[in-house]
Image (tube, rainbow, N blue to C red):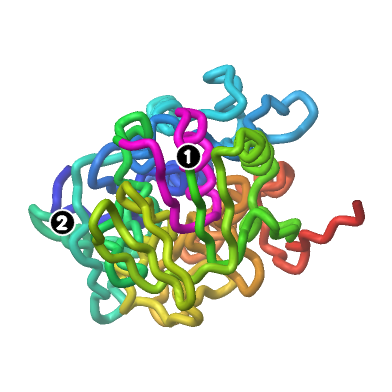
Amino acid sequence: MKKSETYDVVIVGAGAAGIGMGVVLRDLGLENFAILERHQIGESFRRWPQEMNFITPSFPGHGFGQLDLNAIARKTSPAISFRREHLNGTQYARYLEMIADAISLPVHTGVEVQKIEVLPQCRGFGIHVPDGMIQTQFVIWAAGEFQYPNLNPFPGADLCVHNSQVGSWTKLQGDEFTILGGYESGMDAAVNLVALGKKVKVLDRSGTWGNTDPDPSVSLSPYTLQRVELCYSTGRLELIGGVAIEEVTAVPGGYAIHSEYDKWISPTKPIVCTGFEGSLKRIANLFNWSDGYARLNDQDESTITPGLFVVGPSVRHDKAIFCFIYKFRQRFAVVANSIARRLDLDPSHLEVYRDEGMFLDDLSCCDNDCIC
């Protein structure tokens, strides 16, 4: 890659969002774009614990007009590619590689984005990389979240291990574990440890396992609940809700976990499953922020930095949370449509995405209510 090149669009990140967005730009007919990835395609998925699988099921539904829930491109299906319903991270990274190879996406791996500079006189952006600067008219940020864990949610968190730092649950020594955080990653850790014969205690602020909200972005998925119920029946899983962790300290024989009124002792390092800070923090100055989230216009563009778009799990619009693949892929065509019009490209090529439920530009229909 020539570090002095100029592009119409640069996508930062080659995960599910970056590769999916690249496919849409290719379908749009855009040629002069690049995808920058500091590691490998699908790096975040490669870093999942070995035992972690997708909570959303993959199923080949093309024959009846339904896209696989975990597909990021039309006419593709992880279920068909791997003949599995719940893929692991390595398999999904391979799926992304297969797509990139099949249509020759311009992915440049091993390129670290160090800084994004807004150029004067509406000349776009300068993307600083180790060997120089790349210029582009538009930036699409797709760097994701998993590689940016929240490692300091409370004092003493440095005495714990974050779930993203675990390569395999079989590598942890000990027979009893305490997990701090009860959403998907916390319950996945608990399920895998119980399956290994360990005793597990989960402490959670709200008791997520009891949340009946129909939106899986804020409540546990049916797949996870099924597994939790099975583990609970073994007697080796204890769930404690209503706990706000204030501090973790080292004590003789282990670690003390403190809330306002209670204390628990863990003989092993507590496992922190309190989420991720997200990669947008790296370019926080290019966004307005509200309640911890970057404010975007209705085209998923920064409200203060024109030409900077966001795709992936960091996209939010009021109560609409696009944290799952089957949710955020619906916004790829929205971003592509906005860019097409500014580059004087024909956006009609994107209508096929609307026909297949992948062009969600009316957020008033984002309703999770269910009558039964």
290 relative position to 155: left or right: right
Closer to the camera in the image, 62 or 290 = 290
Residue 151: x and y, percent?
30, 61
Closer to the camera in the image, 365 or 197 = 197
Residue that appears at 20% across and 66% down = 115
The residue under label 1 is which amino acid type? Lys
Q: Which residues are magenta?
A: 174-199
* Circle number at residue 129: 2
Residue that appears at 56% across and 43% down = 237
Is 340 rendered above or below residue 246?
above
Residue that appears at 44% across and 31% down = 51
Which type of secondary structure does the marked residue at label 1 adopt?
strand
The residue under label 2 is which amino acid type? Val
Real-space CA distance between mark 2 and mark 1, rounded to the nearest whole angstrom: 47 Å
Which type of secondary structure does the marked residue at label 2 adopt?
strand
Closer to the camera in the image, 331 or 192 = 192
Residue 212: x and y, percent?
75, 58
Mark 2 and mark 1 residues within 8 Å of each other at the beta carbon: no
